[in-house]
Image (cartoon, grey):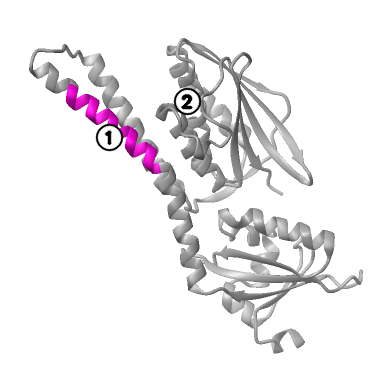
Amino acid sequence: MWLEELPCPVALFSRDRSFYLLNFAAKRMFQFSEEDLLSHPSLWAEQIDADDRDNFFKSQEELASRGNVVRCDYRFFPKGATEPIWIRELSIIANRQANIPWNIVSAFTEISDLQRRHSGAERIRKRIDILKPLFHDLQNRLQVLVMSLELAKRGLMEIDSDFLLQMVYSMKHSVENAQGCLNSSGRRGSLSCLNLSGILERVVGELRGELEHRQVRLHLLCREPLPNVHGDEKQIQTAIQRIIKSCALRLNNGGQLELETAPKKVGRRLYAQIRIHTSCGFAVGPNPSASIGNPLIGSDMAVASEILKNNQGCVSIKSQSENGGLVTISLKAKN
């Protein structure tokens, strides 16, 4: 067949990815067979690095709407690989005959290591932007603790166990946030189809007693069933927990958190959304990862934002002092 005579990796596939045909060079590059891809139509997208999936989906939408050659650069995990390769895909709609199962041709080439190193450096810079305020906060708390102990030693200040426990807790919280940032950013977890409603119900059940102790009332309102999502269950559960706790910490004198769930369609994409209404506003800005204000609030939001990015999701904040705050968690629904 003419496909095997081409020296570069080439794939023929249908627009809905229900049909694949790879030449030998493509099979050698990706280590996948047609049977692997046909048995799991979403497998190709799942093997793309989480940070690059949005660009890939946008390129597919552009191809469907324009029909001319579309270029997309992204990191792809070959079968069994722990590190991705950086590839460039050139796609074109080349066949419109109804009796032929494929209508898109894609050619692939591996991009140089230089570009891959540049991407790695960019990812590290993003982590540093989050870690710097966390470590700065930890340093400040240690300084307060050391000064307090020194004053108590000289008889100039009294320290009780509640003060020490609070200081230890706050430092432990900062360390956990730093660990969460390092463990989640850029790491591929165990991906599966998830019942987000079930995850949310477990989180609410685990947190309700703890929050009631802080005089924070937690109400879960399920207006419509949430669609299933695709991601790492432990990471998504951790992100939701961090965000709810962050909202609760803002309610210093008690209050109410109302969790409302509903699907939301944006363009042609469906998202599962969890909206958290708080009885007071937030001090952090609309970009949690860039607006780390109060370390006990902003740092949780920043770490949760990074976790959600790895799972095709995001968190946004809208704050109005008089009407309270609104925190929205959005995760792309599984096709």
Label of residue 63 in the image: none
Closer to the camera: disc 1 or disc 2?
Answer: 1
Please tell me which residue lies in front, 166 or 6.
166
Question: Relative to 181, is 209 above or below?
Answer: above
Q: Which residues are magenta?
A: 131-147
* Outermost residue to the left: 154
Q: Is residue 202 visible?
A: yes
Pointer 1 or 2: first along the chain: 1
Q: Is residue 79 visible?
A: no
For the point 91% across and 72% down, the residue is 97
Residue 239: in magenta span: no
Q: In the picture provided, is 175 more to the left or to the right than 228? A: left
Residue topped by disc 1: 139
Structural crowding at the residue carrying mark 1, measured as other residues with C-alpha within 10 Å and reported as few (<14), some (14–19) or many (≥20): some
The image quadrant that residue 180 belongs to is top left
The image quadrant that residue 44 belongs to is bottom right
Question: Relative to 209, is 84 above or below?
Answer: below
Q: Position of residue 167 (x, y in %)?
A: 27, 23
Q: Amino acid at mark 1?
A: Gln
Residue 141: in magenta span: yes
Please tell me which residue lies in front, 296 or 29.
296
Residue topped by disc 2: 245
* Outermost residue to the right: 98
For the point 48% across and 37% down, the residue is 302
Q: Amino acid at mark 2?
A: Lys
Element class at badge 2: helix
Q: In the picture provided, is 328 more to the left or to the right than 270? A: left
